[in-house]
């Protein structure tokens, strides 16, 4: 499978590196395009193909991924639509802010539309720990299977409806920032309790990794695992109650809903 990524920004670069790291697609089968040659050097050094011309860059691709700002998507779509192979190539949009009907209209050429799907990862795809959302627009099940194969090993992928993408983005893409803000807050608390700042960060991140492993390996509800470490009159219940009194759960939900 050959993949072309249009856009060498943070998300485009992370996707290119993560897909290559996952090992199912060789770096030499990935092309990344950008009008600024200086931004492509890093990917050349990783063994990827690069091009400053989008139309040239997509010629041999099986999957064409558009990773630009939402307001740039229409211009890119109209540029490459005339040279797309509608029978062979699957088009992916990594800009959830672009509406379905707009995508279809932008890529329409001579009355025909290619197979189009959203794929929304988060920046952890660079380290193969992304939460990926796949939402078909005009893509059929066989096209979705191609995208699932492309993303294999880059994290966890979930096929959703396009109207669910905004919620998924709040939970997973924005969620990276929310999780990191918790790490920052807990580390500050650890420092106040007497740990060195760098040690506090290590402690909090490893503890988060442990919590994730508990849920992944047991499939249990979070509260079931919380109960295991919450003893009557103990430190944990006192801390949990203090956090709830300060509005912890309500603040998280309010923050997520603010992004909709």
Image (tube, rainbow, N blue to C red):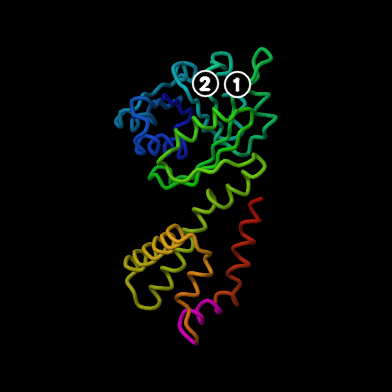
Q: Main secondary structure of the magenta part?
A: helix
Determine which of the numbered discs, if any, sits on residue 89 in the image.
2
In the rendered view, would you say 62 is above or below 123? above
> Of residues 258 and 171, which is closer to you in this image?
171
User: Which residue occupies 66% across, 50% down?
Assistant: 260
Q: Is residue 239 magenta?
A: yes
* Residue 36 pos. (x, y %): 43, 27
Highlighted range, magenta: 233-242
User: Which residue occupies 50% across, 75% down?
Assistant: 227
Q: Quadrant of residue 143?
A: top right
In the image, 260: left or right of 51? right
Q: Residues within 10 Å of mark 2 (few under 14, many from 20)?
A: many
* Residue 219 pos. (x, y %): 49, 59
Which of pointers 2 and 1 lies earlier in the amino acid sequence? 2
* Residue 189 pos. (x, y %): 43, 73
Q: Is residue 5 magenta?
A: no
State the separation of the CA atoms marked 2 and 1. 7 Å
* Residue 10 pos. (x, y %): 45, 40
In the rendered view, would you say 204 is above or below 163? below
> Of residues 188 and 242, which is closer to you in this image?
242
User: Which residue occupies 34% across, 38% down?
Assistant: 21
In the rendered view, would you say 33 is above or below 258? above
Q: Quadrant of residue 134?
A: top right
User: Which residue occupies 68% across, 29% down?
Assistant: 102
Disc 2 element? loop
In the image, 121: left or right of 29? right
Q: Which residue is mark 1?
A: 114
Tell me if label 2 and label 1 are in contact, CB under 8 Å.
yes
Q: Quadrant of the N terminus?
A: top left
> Of residues 225 and 16, which is closer to you in this image?
225
> Of residues 252 and 62, which is closer to you in this image?
62
Q: Which residue reaches farthest bottom?
A: 233
């Amino acid at each position: 499978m050959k993949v072309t990524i249009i856009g060498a920004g943070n998300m485009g670069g992370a996707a290119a590196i993560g897909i290559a790291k996952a090992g199912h697609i060789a770096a030499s089968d990935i092309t990344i395009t950008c009008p600024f040659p200086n931004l492509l050097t890093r990917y050349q050094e990783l063994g990827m193909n690069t091009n400053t011309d989008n139309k040239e860059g997509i010629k041999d691709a099986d999957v064409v991924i558009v990773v630009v700002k939402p307001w740039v998507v229409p211009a890119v779509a109209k540029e490459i639509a005339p040279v797309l192979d509608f029978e062979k190539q699957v088009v992916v949009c990594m800009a959830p802010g672009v509406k379905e009907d707009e995508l279809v209209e932008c890529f329409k050429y001579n009355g025909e539309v290619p197979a189009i799907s959203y794929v929304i990862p988060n920046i952890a795809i660079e380290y193969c720990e992304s939460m990926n959302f796949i939402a078909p627009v005009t893509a059929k099940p066989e096209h979705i299977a191609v995208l699932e194969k492309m993303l294999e090993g880059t994290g966890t992928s979930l096929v959703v409806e396009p109207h669910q993408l905004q919620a998924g983005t709040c939970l997973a893409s924005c969620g990276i920032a929310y999780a990191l803000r918790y790490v920052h807050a807990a580390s500050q608390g650890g420092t106040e309790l007497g740990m060195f700042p760098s040690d506090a960060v290590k402690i909090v991140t490893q503890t988060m990794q442990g919590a994730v492993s508990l849920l992944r390996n047991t499939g249990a509800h979070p509260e079931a695992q919380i109960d295991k470490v919450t003893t009557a009159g103990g430190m944990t219940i006192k801390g949990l109650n203090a956090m709830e009194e300060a509005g912890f759960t309500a603040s998280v939900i309010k923050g997520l809903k603010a992004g909709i």
